[in-house]
């Protein structure tokens, strides 16, 4: 949870520096209450969860987005293990494109691809990285 707090603090500082207001909330996603059709966008960047939590998060995102809403995500792919430039060392916490294809009953995929990118985000996330980038629109 400490990293979440650091991320929230960083987002608040960035928003302040750009004269943008944001609303943040730290929650346990394993026990989260996802309000029905409450949001126009959900963003999940490097949200690496155990499989049972990932399933709950995907279900919650499907529930909480309004029709036409967007789900945007960038996560480490399973191929990231070969790079060793960040992210979890446990393959069960990483993603495949198939995991996002499973959302297609509720989402139209606008972007879905695995790619290699360069990331410089501190000492723990530095170098070429295998990621999956996804943008889906709620049906």
Image (spheres, rainbow, N blue to C red):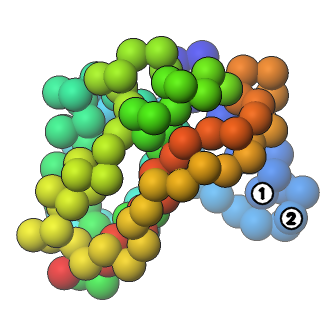
Residue designated by label 2: 18
Give the secondary structure at mark 1.
helix
Report the side of 112 relative to 1 (left or right): left
Residue 6 appearing in the image: no
In the rendered view, would you say 23 is above or below 79?
A: below
| Tag 2 near tag 1, CB within 8 Å | yes
* Residue in the picture at 46% in, 55% down: 114
* Residue in the picture at 44% in, 40% down: 77
In the rendered view, would you say 132 is above or below 84?
A: below
Most foreground residue, 33 or 126: 126
Number of marks drawn:
2
In the rendered view, would you say 106 is above or below 5?
A: below
Q: Residues within 10 Å of mark 2 (few under 14, many from 20)?
A: few
Report the side of 96 relative to 10 (left or right): left
* Residue in the picture at 76% in, 66% down: 20
Which residue is the extreme one toward the right?
17
Most foreground residue, 34 or 79: 79
In the rendered view, would you say 63 is above or below 116?
A: below
Residue 112 appearing in the image: yes
x and y, in percent, of residue 18 in the image: 86, 64
Picture disc at residue 15: 1
> Rounded to the nearest whole Å, what is the CA distance between mark 2 and mark 1?
5 Å
Which residue is the extreme one toward the left?
105
Picture disc at residue 134: none
x and y, in percent, of residue 5 in the image: 62, 27
x and y, in percent, of residue 21 in the image: 70, 62
């Amino acid at each position: 949870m400490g990293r979440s707090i650091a991320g929230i603090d960083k987002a608040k500082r960035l928003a302040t520096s750009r004269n943008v207001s944001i609303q943040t909330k730290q929650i346990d996603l394993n026990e989260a209450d996802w309000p029905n059709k409450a949001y126009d966008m959900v963003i999940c960047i490097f949200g690496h969860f155990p499989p049972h939590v990932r399933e709950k998060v995907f279900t919650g995102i499907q529930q909480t987005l309004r029709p036409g809403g967007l789900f945007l995500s960038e996560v480490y792919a399973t191929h990231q293990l070969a790079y060793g430039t960040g992210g979890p060392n446990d393959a069960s916490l990483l993603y495949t494109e198939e995991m996002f294809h499973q959302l297609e009953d509720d989402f139209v995929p606008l972007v879905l691809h695995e790619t290699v990118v360069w990331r410089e985000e501190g000492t723990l996330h530095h170098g070429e990285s295998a990621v999956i980038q996804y943008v889906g629109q709620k049906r």
